[in-house]
């Protein structure tokens, strides 16, 4: 790609910026292990053309958590409070997560989670520096990208443009081995950032053993967790002895589409409340459903993934799962 084209891309990014604003638990029970960046480095003794490991501070990462208490289940999705395991003892930070099956063991062992581990998704599809740059452009151009993620991607723009310039220079000079090293280092660094960018961050809260849980760190998934698309009349969530389910509204969400008319999708919202706790703090979840009648209440997506999303309704955020791939539907 020509350098002039890259400069045009950078200008486009600035314009976009000016105009815009599963189950996550760790390999060792203390934090999601995100692969480090690197590569073998340049093969000659010349200066390193670009060191992607110096792309600034690492991104915020998903909290590594172990299944702690069963909250409830619905439509093939099992919800759990989660804890961090330290020396075999459940401790903060607490949060909440989900699984596609009922876990037979909860809490901690001496070496980690009793239930086993499922790290946040951090696979990447990009195979070149150019594709990484195009992915950054797509994130910035997506109107449903959250402000936090947009800010984070924008901080990487100078780095990816510099890396692409230097990659072209190395190829033009016949320094193929060094160009490959640079490419692999960029892809390794991008994989670390993708782990953050694919996590849905929700500000919902509830009390667990007196500890306030202030966020959900659920990874977006490559496939829907939902077994089916139920109607609002048949949708329900099973209670447990520690938690009860409080249904909220059925809401309609409008999905913007590139060059096409927007489409509507529908979600049943609900609160999960700990029994015996009088504080109003509650976990807020939702699932895609098929309504019996067109709902009157509208919500908006503030963080669009593939099958995991954050929507806002009545001033509150809800972590929701969809049966449809909404990112593919939107064309972003």
Image (tube, rainbow, N blue to C red):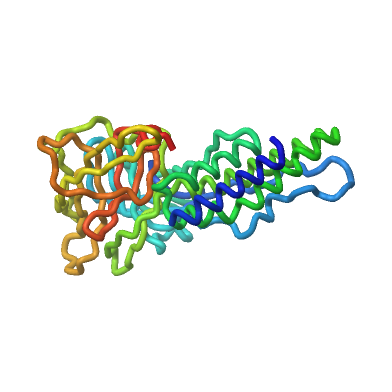
Report the residue that reaches farthest toward the right.
45
| Residue 31 in sight in this render | no
Residue 146 % position (x, y): 42, 53
What residue appears at the point 41 percent right and 62 percent down from the top-left corner? 93
User: In the image, what residue occupies the spot 54% across and 40% down?
Assistant: 135
Farthest-out residue, top = 228
Residue name at image x 39 percent, y 54 percent: 201
- Answer yes or no: is residue 86 visible: yes
- Disc tally is 0
Asked if 291 appears above or below 312 in the picture, the reply is above
The quadrant holding residue 137 is top right
Which residue is at a point 16% across and 49% down the rendered structure image? 297
Towards the viewer: 3 or 330: 3
Q: Give percent across and percent down for residue 233.
A: 10, 37
131 or 289: which is nearer to us? 131
- Quadrant of the frame with the N terminus: top right
Return the residue nearer the eye: 17 or 56.
Answer: 17
Q: Quick check: 163 left or right of 252?
A: right
| For residue 296, side relative to residue 95 (left or right) | left
In which quadrant will I find the C terminus?
top left
Q: Is residue 150 left or right of residue 177?
A: left
The image shows residue 313 at horizontal and vertical percentages of: 24, 54
């Amino acid at each position: 790609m020509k350098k002039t084209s890259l400069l045009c891309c950078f200008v486009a990014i600035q314009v976009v910026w000016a105009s815009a604003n599963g189950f996550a638990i760790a390999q060792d029970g203390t934090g999601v292990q995100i692969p480090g960046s690197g590569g073998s480095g340049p093969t000659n003794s010349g200066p390193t053309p670009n060191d992607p490991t110096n792309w600034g501070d690492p991104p915020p990462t998903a909290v590594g958590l172990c299944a702690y208490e069963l909250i409830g289940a619905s439509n093939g999705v099992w919800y759990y409070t989660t804890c961090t395991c330290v020396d075999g003892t459940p401790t903060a930070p607490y949060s909440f997560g989900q699984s596609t099956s009922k876990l037979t063991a909860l809490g901690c062992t001496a070496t980690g989670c009793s239930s086993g581990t499922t790290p946040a998704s951090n696979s990447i599809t990009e195979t070149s520096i150019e594709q990484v740059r195009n992915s950054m452009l797509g994130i910035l151009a997506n109107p449903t990208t959250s402000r936090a993620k947009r800010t984070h991607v924008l901080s990487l723009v100078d780095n990816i443009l510099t890396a692409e310039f230097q990659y072209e220079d190395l190829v033009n000079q016949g320094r193929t081995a060094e160009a490959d090293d640079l490419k692999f280092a960029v892809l390794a660094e991008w994989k670390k950032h993708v782990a953050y960018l694919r996590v849905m961050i929700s500000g919902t809260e509830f009390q667990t053993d007196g500890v306030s849980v202030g966020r959900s760190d659920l990874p977006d998934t490559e496939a829907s967790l939902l077994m089916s698309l139920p109607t609002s009349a048949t949708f329900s969530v099973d209670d447990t002895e520690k938690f009860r389910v409080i249904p909220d509204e059925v809401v309609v969400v409008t999905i913007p589409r590139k060059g096409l008319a927007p489409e509507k999708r529908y979600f049943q919202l609900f609160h999960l409340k700990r029994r015996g706790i009088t504080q109003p703090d509650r976990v807020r979840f939702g699932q895609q459903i098929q309504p019996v009648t067109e709902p009157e209440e509208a919500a908006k997506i503030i963080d669009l993934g593939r099958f995991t999303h954050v929507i806002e309704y009545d001033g509150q955020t809800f972590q929701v799962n969809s049966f449809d791939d909404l990112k593919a539907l939107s064309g972003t």
